Amino acid sequence: MDKIKVIYMGTPEFSVKPLEEINKLCDVLLVVTQPDKLVGRKQEIKYSPVKEYALKNNIEVFQPAKIKDDYQRIIDLKPELIITCAYGQIIPKAILDLPKYKCINIHASLLPKYRGGAPIHHAIINGDKETGVTIMYMDEKMDSGNILYQKNIPIEEIDNVGTMFEKLSVLGSEMIKEFLPRFISGDFKSIKQDESLVTYAYNISKEDELISFNNTTINIFNKIRGLNPFPVGYTLLEGKRVKLYSSRIGTLNKGYIGEIINIYPDGLGVKTCDGEIIITELQFEGKKRTSVKDYLNGIQNKNELLGKKFTE
């Protein structure tokens, strides 16, 4: 197909692979991404992954603090199509109505399920067996536009947010490569979303990061992996924060909720409301992330851990 003029809007690593394909297929006039962040103790400037890609590929970058108030640069460039993917701001109607081919979005869920900013986290936390990517028209309401193309992939028990981000980013790039030529030629149908099936996946809050052992083993297992590697769930041990990165399901059912009930070569068995969760990777406050196997290798009397309780 002839290269059409496109503006791409995205921010995290998830958005980079689709941009790579779009840059091959289209004339990318501009990349719109979130403003740079100051990170760490030294408050060093950190670019978004999408900005880094754009700079390496000589694509102009635009970073409005609030796009609803600052979008003249987009209008001036007169794009034929705008594609968004995990951009992070609501697009104003003046932009939605601008391009010849309208605005389309690459969203990491099987819409109408999981509209919102954290669909991958919520799919794993809720124990879903599959998820996918939806390419859709953009609308004024969040993730509510007509569906253009959709594909699903399984969520395995070994998956976490990090592995699913990578899988879905690859899927999104493959889908946009397949879909764009058809879309530009008019060879597609759009399907209205069923509003009765809508669910939401709002951004993870600080409160959501707390892991309570007063829950079922499977729910704790899913929540730990549904927050790994970011923002990472945590609990408290003797008043100090402990981040929990990975776990597996145990078989014991004894002791008090939150109590360390067994020591395994690779994990700490903790009592849940219906059984045992075995923590296999963690990070104590002020320490580095470590496997429990390595942590236990540094302790002389491992049995001293028995009876200690994780609390909320």
Image (cartoon, grey):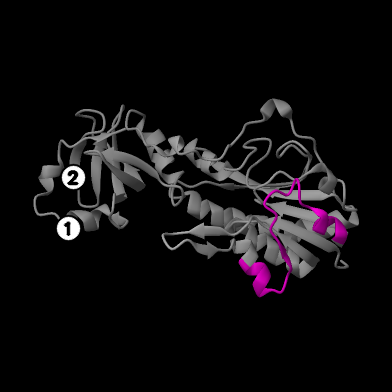
Other-residue count near label 2 (Cα within 10 Å), few / some / many at <14 / 14–19 / ≥20: some
Name the secondary structure under disc 1.
Answer: helix
Q: Position of residue 248 (x, y in %)?
A: 33, 44
Q: If you read the primary sequence from the N terminus, does the residue marked by circle 2 or circle 1 appear first?
A: 2
Image position of 256 with respect to 226: above or below = above
Q: Report whether 247 appears left or right of 292.
A: right
Mark 2 to mark 1: distance in Å? 12 Å
Q: Position of residue 159 (x, y in %)?
A: 46, 50
Name the secondary structure under disc 2.
Answer: strand
Q: Report whether 265 appears left or right of 198.
A: left
Q: Does residue 68 show up magenta in the picture? A: yes
Res 189 quadrant in image: top right
Residue bearing the label numbered 2: 263
Image position of 139 with respect to 105: above or below = above
Q: Does residue 184 show up magenta in the picture? A: no
Whether residue 228 appears in this view of the structure is yes
Res 91 quadrant in image: top right
Q: Position of residue 183 (x, y in %)?
A: 84, 54
Other-residue count near label 1 (Cα within 10 Å), few / some / many at <14 / 14–19 / ≥20: few
Residue 297: mark: 1
Q: Position of residue 268 (x, y in %)?
A: 23, 44
Q: Name the residue: 80% across, 55% down.
A: 82
Q: Amino acid at mark 2?
A: Ile
Q: Report whether 211 appears left or right of 197.
A: left
Q: Name the residue: 20% across, 29% down.
A: 254
Locate the N terminus and report the quarter of the image it occupies: bottom right
Res 237 quadrant in image: top left
Q: Amino acid at mark 1?
A: Asn
| Magenta residue span | 52-76
Name the mark nearer the viewer: 2 or 1. 1
Q: Farthest left residue?
A: 301
